[in-house]
Image (cartoon, grey):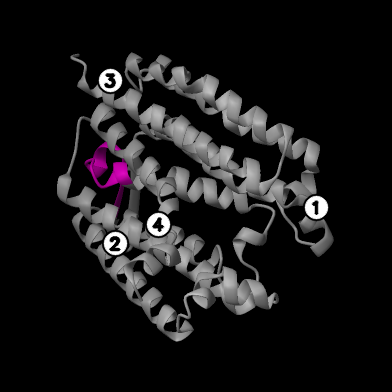
Amino acid sequence: MTLPVFWELVEARTKLASILPFLVGILFAALYFQQFNGIDTAIFFVAMLLFDMTTTAINNLMDYHKAKDQTYRDQTNIVGRAHLNPTGVAALIGVMLLIATALGLILVWRTDWLLLLIGAVCFGIGIFYTFGPLPLSRLPLGEVFSGVTMGLAIPFIAIYVNVDAAKLLNLTITWPRFDLSGDFVALILIGLTCVPCMATIANVMLANNLSDYDEDVQNGRTTLPMYLGKKWGLVLYQFLAYVGYPVIVLVVALGGLPVATLLMLISLPWVIKNTNRFVAKQVKAETFVTAVRTLVIENGSLILAMLIGWGLPG
């Protein structure tokens, strides 16, 4: 397997959906807690990317095995098009998953047992998002699973590995007792700060399902727009595209982020333009990319604004 084929198998171009929330978490830890742990951050970054690549490879392999369209199987899916050995792809997936798991256990050893529980839930959602007889992505709550797992869990873990557990969320086990303590205000501020990530990541899947709406109706596939209807699905899409902006204003007002973070609002006109374009026409080949652009613009502007706030005195 050549490197370009590997990058396509794991869809390296999509990894911004993991990297952007990761950066939001790192910057929140630095701004709110004034803490940064370079070693733990590096370990988590590698583990996160490996696991993201693993789930993507699983998705491509499962699509290859389940494909009923021979043209798609042989000419579109990377496994068939590149003449990859499915057994070899499965072995590669196993190796990446094993390394990601090992790195996760190292982080648990270096931080707190609570990370093991959080990581296990994330691993389970990630694996069964596309794997199994009824993948989570094919349920009407696929947007929730993707948004929460990538938009909230990734930045939370990025914060957790950088901050003293006692300042955020701490699990103490003294058999047969355990005690869980934490900072309720900090947890609320983290959740609010992650809203742009959660909403825009969920919107990418929602845009995909809205673009496939007519095809899904014909094939009887159950997605969220199938339950809401296309009209209300588009209303939800617009809400998710914009909700991050007032929430970040609220976080700044509550003192969770510096005032400079409001510079994020400069990106709103571009998000409005992208959103209006998709609402007017839901064609995957033409307008689906606007949802991805909104993800990058909205979260990228948040990250840049947080960086500016981090660099300013006081």
Please tell me in which quadrant of the rendered image residue 129 appears. bottom right
Q: Residues within 10 Å of mark 3 (few under 14, many from 20)?
A: many
- Disc 1 marks which residue? 214
The span from disc 3 to disc 2 (Cα, nearest Å) is: 31 Å
Q: Which mark is residue 309?
A: 3
Amino acid type at circle 3 is Gly
Q: Residue at x 27, y 21 (%)?
A: 308
The x and y percentages for residue 62 are 56, 73
Please tell me in which quadrant of the rendered image residue 160 appears. top left
Front-lying residue, 204 or 248:
204
Please tell me in which quadrant of the rendered image residue 105 appears. bottom left
Q: Which mark is residue 104?
A: 2
135 shown above or below 19:
below
Choose the circle earlier in sequence order: 3 or 2: 2
Amino acid type at circle 2 is Gly
The x and y percentages for residue 252 are 40, 18
- Disc 4 marks which residue? 12
Q: Which residues are magenta?
A: 158-172
The span from disc 4 to disc 2 (Cα, nearest Å) is: 21 Å
The x and y percentages for residue 22 are 34, 44
Amino acid type at circle 1 is Asp
Q: Secondary structure at mark 3?
A: helix
The x and y percentages for residue 266 are 45, 17
Q: Secondary structure at mark 4?
A: helix
Q: Secondary structure at mark 1?
A: helix
Residue 272 visible? The answer is yes
Q: Residue at x 32, y 68 (%)?
A: 3
The span from disc 2 to disc 1 (Cα, nearest Å) is: 41 Å
